[in-house]
Image (tube, helix red, strand yellow):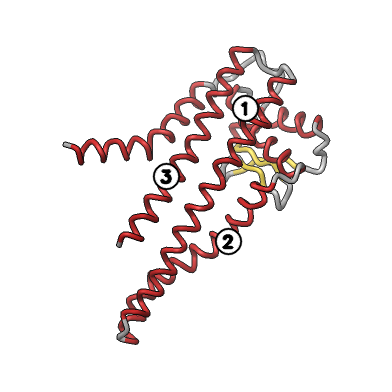
Amino acid sequence: MVVLLGILLLLLLLFGPRLWVQAVMQRHSRTREDFPGTGGEFARHLLDRLHLDEVGLETSENGDHYDPGARMVRLTADKMAGQSLTAITVAAHEVGHALQDRLDYQPLRWRTRLALLAQTVQTLGNWLFILAPLATAATRAPSAAFLMLAAGVASFASAALVHLVTLPVEWDASFRRALPLLEAGHYLSRKDLRAARQILTAAAFTYVAGSLASLLNLWRWVRR
C-alpha cells in the first residue's frame, strides 16, 4: 500500500503540473473582444515601449520562447494571432526574457551556455551508452565500460543542471518582468491580473516537474 501511494505521488508530481498548465491555459484561451490586439501585437508593443527595437518577432512551430542568439521572440501561431488572456500573458513572459537579455541578467546567460553544452554532452552520452558493451567485449576490461557509463551518467547530470538553472530564469521573467509590466501599464483588469498570475504560476510548475524528472532519472542511473 505504501509503495502504491508512493508511485501515485510520484506520478502526480511528474505529470500533475503539466496537466494543470494545459487546463489553465485552455481555460483562458477564448477570444476576448475587449482586448485591442493579439498576442503578437502586444509583444511588439511591449518591445517598442521598452526600446527593444532590435528584438524581432516571429511565429514558431517549436513552442513559445526567446532566442538570445538571434534576439528573437517566437510565439506559436495560436499566441501570435490569438486575442486571449493566455496569448497576452505568454507574450509578456517572452518579452520578459528579452528584457533579461538587455539587462545582462546572468542566470539567462548561464542557462543559454549550459543548454548548448548539455546538448553536446547528452549526444556524447547516448553514444557512450551504445558503445559501452562493445568496449567491454573488445578489451575484456569491465573498467572500460564503467568509465564510459560514468561519462554517460554525466549527460543526465547536465540535463538536470539545465532544468535547475532554468527554473529561476523563468520565475524572474514571469514575476519580476512580465507581471509588473502588465500591472504598470494597466493592460489588464484586476480580475484578469489574478488569472494572468495563475497562468504564469502554472507554467513555472512545468519546470519544477522537469527538474524533478531529471533528478530522478539521474538518481536512477547513479544507483545502477
- Mark 3 — residue? 212
- Is 198 located above or below residue 6 in the figure? above
SS type, badge 3: helix
Mark toward the start of the polypeptide (2 vs 3)? 2
Residue 143 vs residue 50, the one in the foreground: 143
The quadrant of the rendering that contains the N terminus is top left
- Mark 1 — residue? 89
- Is 196 located above or below residue 56 in the figure? above
What kind of residue is marked 2?
Leu
The quadrant of the rendering that contains the C terminus is bottom left
How many numbered marks are there?
A: 3
Label 2–label 1 contact, CB within 8 A? no
- CA distance for labels 3 and 1: 25 Å
Residue 87 vs residue 128, the one in the foreground: 128
- Mark 2 — residue? 117
Mark toward the start of the polypeptide (3 vs 1)? 1
Residue mark closest to the camera, 3 vs 1 = 3
Residue 101, image x, y percentages: 73, 44
What kind of residue is marked 1?
Thr
What kind of residue is marked 3?
Leu
- CA distance for labels 2 and 1: 30 Å
Residue at 43%, 34% in the rendered image? 17
